[in-house]
Amino acid sequence: MTQARTPADPSDPSLPSPPPVKNVEFKALLLLVFTALLVGASVLYLLYSRGAFETTQRLVLVADDSEGVVVGMNLTFSGFPIGRVRRIELAEDGNARILIDVPTRDAHWLRQSSVFTLVRGVVGNTNIRAYSGVLTDPPLPEGAVRQVLRGDASAEIPRVVSAAKELLENLNALAAKEGPLGASLANLHAMTEKLNGPRGALGVLTGNDADAQKLIVALDRTNQLLARLDGLVIKADGLTAKADAQVFGPQGVVPDVKAAMVQVNTLLGDTRESLKKMDAVLVEAKAVGANARVATEDLGTLRAEVEANLRKVEGLINEINRKWPFKRDTEIKLP
């Protein structure tokens, strides 16, 4: 059997020493330079990620209290960070000035009409938000100072608790037995009992049994009256049918009236012909009347002449009567 070999002792002077490493100082220097470059690149990347090498626009927000605001906090617009808190300082008037650097590429979201809010949540986190309603307004200038609106959600908790307590008290007052809700439920229960009673909904509407009984009697009389009206309507329908038969039937009035109208039309035709003949007679009468008018004018002249002759004869007779002395009766009269 072979005997196991024991490891060599490095302190044994009989062993040969390892060869020396070449350029140890140079390699150590390279490692140190590489480490320094790596650290510098990390620092530069960190600064670049924080926007240390990009142009920014300064914005100053004024608040009465900067509690919860820390350096490096983001200014958000629609949920996206567009700026970073660079410094917080106390102004001479006692207000807090929050200096924010906004990158130039994101400054177009801020307008002169923009509103800035400082909201502190229930758990203590604080947010700075910007709201721009009209993006067509003029842009926010460099170094603009704006008042920030505070909104503390934790400050609203006591008010909400007080309102909830008051609401519960009001609900308890309503639900109490003597409260409005209890009275309404009692009235509803009484109404339900009346609905389930013998009068039903009629008793609920009238309010008492006496009025309900009167209403039932009135309804019965109304039904009787309606029955009588139905009989009258049936009789009226029969009379209407008889009247239709007497008026429009074969032996009714309408055929006789039609025959009479035919005779009247015939008489009117005859009358129309008689009127035409009468018109012709009137024309002839007008001609005869014209001739008679001429003859009448001639008769007037003749009458005038006769009257003149009679006057002359009368004058002659008067003259004879005046000059006839031997007659007892000296007056001569014309027949």
Image: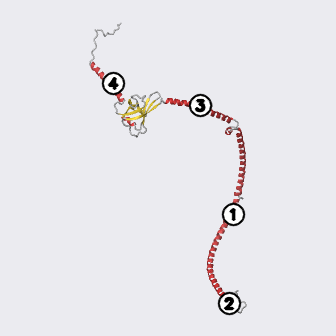
Residue 183 appears in the figure:
yes
Secondary element at image label 2:
helix
Quadrant of the snapshot with the C terminus: bottom right
Its colouring scheme is secondary structure
Badge number at residue 39: 4
Residue in the image at 71% along x and 43% along y: 218
Work out how far the residue at label 1 is from the one at label 4, CA to CA, in angstroms: 133 Å
- Three-letter amino acid code at disc 3? Ala
Element marked by disc 3: helix
Q: Quadrant of the N terminus?
A: top left
Q: Position of residue 282 (x, y in %)?
A: 63, 74
* Distance in Å between CA atoms under marks 3 and 2: 149 Å
N-term-proximal mark, 3 vs 4: 4
- Give the mark nearest the N terminus, 1 or 4: 4
Asked which quadrant contains residue 193, the reply is: top right
Image coords of residue 211 (percent x, y): 70, 40
Residue 173: mark: 3
The residue tagged 2 is 322
Residue type of the residue flagged with mark 1: Ala
Give above or below for 267 relative to 180. below
